[in-house]
Image (cartoon, helix red, strand yellow):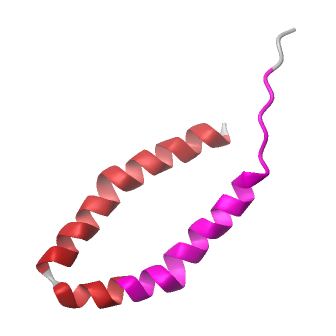
Amino acid sequence: MAAVISQIFHLLFYRIVVPFVRTCLMVLPSVQTIWKSLTDVFVAPFFHSVGRCFAMVNIRLDQE
């Protein structure tokens, strides 16, 4: 279940958020500095924590 949620989140993030941010950064170079700061302070630690949470999730499927 966690792997499915992770894959869905990954696809949505890289299909919607990343292209939007790249477009903004190309159009407004001054935003690049602000975006890098926000990424370093908020986004990177958040995803690092989420990765640590899901790293210990194990799914076991048994046939009965």
Circle count: 0
Residue 16 left/right relative to 51 = left
Q: Is residue 15 above or below residue 39?
A: above
Q: What residue is at 39 percent from the left and 49 percent from the top? A: 12
Q: Position of residue 1 (x, y in %)?
A: 66, 36
Q: Is residue 12 above or below residue 30?
A: above
Q: Which residue shows up at 65% across the image and 60% down it?
A: 51
Residue 6 at what x, y percent from top left? 56, 47
Magenta residues, dominant SS class: helix
Q: Which residues are magenta?
A: 36-61
Q: Residue furthest left?
A: 27
Where is residue 55? Give x, y as percent: 73, 53
Q: Is residue 16 above or below residue 60?
A: below
In the displayed orientation, state which residue is furthest to the top.
Answer: 64
- Residue 21 lies in magenta, yes or no? no
Q: Quadrant of residue 3?
A: top right
Q: Which residue: 35% across, 83% down?
A: 35
Q: Quadrant of residue 63?
A: top right
47 vs 57, left or right, is left
Instruction: Examine the structure image and report whether residue 40 is included in the region drawn in magenta.
Output: yes
Compared to residue 16, the image places residue 20 above or below, namely below
Picture quarter with the C terminus: top right
Q: Is residue 9 left or right of residue 48?
A: left
Q: Position of residue 38 (x, y in %)?
A: 43, 84
- Residue at position x 32%, y 50% from top? 15
